[in-house]
Amino acid sequence: MTDVVDSDELLRRIQRARAWAAQEERAWRARGDERAREDSGDPGAARDAEVRGVAYGVVVRVLEEILTPGRHTAEG
């Protein structure tokens, strides 16, 4: 059964999700940079880390738009 939450709790949950996604974005981007610098590194692993970093970045931007509508401009 799902719990009913008030708007303040929903806001806190979205903020926590945004913070977690931002942390994951930084971690995956760092991992991708590290893999790309390795001479014998697996190019597939570097690409995977890059893609995951971009995906988490998109999640962060979506959650930021939910929290502060119109504050961010659309980027091409």
Image (spheres, grey):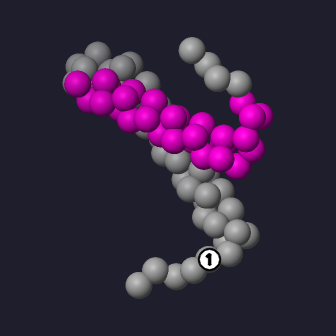
Give above or below for 56 relative to 50: below
Considering the image in quadrants, where does the N terminus appear? Answer: bottom left
Identify the image quadrant of residue 52.
Answer: top left
Frontmost residue, 61 versus 24? 61
Residue that mark 1 sits on: 5
Name the element at disc 1: loop
Residue 75: x percent and y percent?
Answer: 61, 19
Percent across and percent down for residue 64 are: 66, 43
Quadrant, the C terminus: top right
Magenta portion: prevailing SS class: helix
**Residue 66 located left or right of residue 45:** right
| Residue at the (70%, 49%) spot, across then down | 67
- Residue 56 picture location, percent across and down: 47, 39
- 12, 1: nearer the viewer: 1
User: Would residue 75 appear left or right of 45 to someone viewing this image?
Assistant: right
Whole-percent x and y of residue 32? Answer: 39, 28
The three-letter amino acid code for the residue at tag 1 is Val
Magenta-colored span: 44-72
